Image: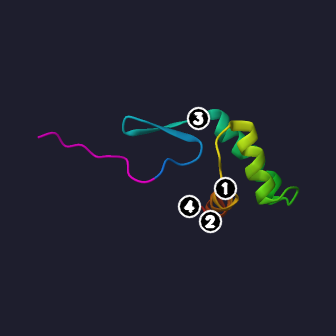
Amino acid sequence: MENTRKLKGHVPFGYKKEEKELIPIESELEALEEIKDLVNNKVISLREGSSWIEYKTGRKLSYQGLKNIIDNERLGQ
């Protein structure tokens, strides 16, 4: 019997699922890096940041999802 493990949960922003591995999507990760600094420095809001990411990448990211990514990075998770 073959021992297989499925990738559980959702695929994080900036990655795609291929077979059972997460593969980085450089354009999405670069867009995320650009926007994090603007949000952290209060140049734009989380809602504006999430809209800009969707415009730039074509992939939707809610403002709460963006907040979670920024907060987790701040906490070192």
Which part of the image, by quadrant, shows the C terminus? bottom right
Residue hosting label 2: 75
The structure residue drawn at horizontal position 70% and vertical position 45%, both measured from the top left corner, is 32
For marks 4 and 1, give the one nearer the viewer: 1
Left or right, 7 with respect to 30, comes to left
Residue extending furthest toward the right:
43
Q: Position of residue 17 (x, y in %)?
A: 45, 38
Q: Earlier in the sequence, mark 3 or mark 4?
A: 3
Q: Residues within 10 Å of mark 1 (few under 14, many from 20)?
A: some
Is residue 37 left or right of 24 when viewed as pictured? right
The residues colored magenta run 1-9
In front: label 2 or label 1: 1
Mark 2 vs 1, N-terminal side: 1
Task: Give the CA distance from mark 2 to mark 1.
Answer: 20 Å
Q: Position of residue 70 (x, y in %)?
A: 68, 59
**Would you identify the image quadrant in which residue 21 lies?**
top left
Q: Which residue is mark 1?
A: 62
| Residue that carries the numbered disc 3 in the rendered image | 25
State the SS at label 2: loop
